[in-house]
Image (cartoon, rainbow, N blue to C red):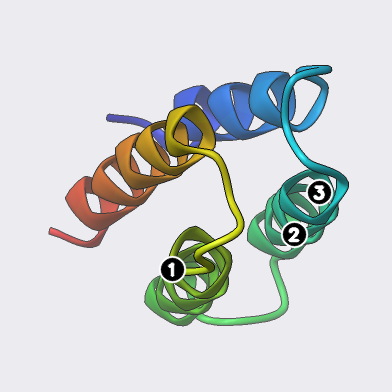
Amino acid sequence: MELEKVLVKIDETSQDYSMPRRVKSVLKKVGDDLKKKDQDFSMRVTTAIYGIEEVANDINIPMHAKTTLWDIISDLESLKR
């Protein structure tokens, strides 16, 4: 998967009205950080994965949001290879 496709998925998810505010804010930050070119690519991806994992592991996040977040994490992990 390409970075642009992952960024589109992150952007679409961050605009989904059914997502909790906390998830939206984390996804917006992750998307912005992934677009920055001043850091090493693998470092940006790893930081994004950890940021999304942190919010996905919150017990107060609805199951549909967790599923979407894990899907994004899977896409990000495929970029690292």
Asked whether, in this view, residue 41 is left or right of residue 28, the answer is left
Q: Earlier in the sequence, mark 1 or mark 2?
A: 2
Label 3: state its secondary structure.
helix
* Residue 62 place in picture, x, y as percent: 55, 40
* Residue 29 place in picture, x, y as percent: 80, 60
Q: Residues within 10 Å of mark 3 (few under 14, many from 20)?
A: some
Q: Residue furthest front?
A: 60
Asked whether, in this view, residue 27 is left or right of residue 70, the answer is right
Q: Which residue is mark 1?
A: 57
What residue sits 54% from the left and 29% below the top?
A: 4
User: The C terminus appears in which quarter of the rendering?
Assistant: bottom left
Q: Residues within 10 Å of mark 1 (few under 14, many from 20)?
A: few
Say if mark 3 contacts mark 2, CB within 8 Å. yes
Mark 1 → mark 2, Cα distance in angstroms: 13 Å
Asked whether, in this view, residue 43 is left or right of residue 80, the answer is right
What residue type is disc 3 on? Lys
Q: Which residue is mark 2?
A: 26
* Residue 26 place in picture, x, y as percent: 74, 59
User: The N terminus appears in which quarter of the rendering?
Assistant: top left
Viewer-proximal residue among 1 and 48: 48
What residue sits 52% from the left and 78% below the top?
A: 47
Q: Which residue is mark 3?
A: 28
Say if mark 1 contacts mark 2, CB within 8 Å. no
Asked whether, in this view, residue 39 is left or right of residue 24, the answer is left
Mark 3 → mark 1, Cα distance in angstroms: 18 Å
Q: Give the foreground label among 3 and 1.
A: 1
What residue sits 64% from the left and 58% below the top?
A: 34
Q: Residue furthest left?
A: 81
Q: Which of the 4 image quarters holds residue 22?
A: bottom right
Say if mark 3 contacts mark 1, CB within 8 Å. no
- Height in image: 22 above or below 49? above
What residue type is disc 1 on? Asn
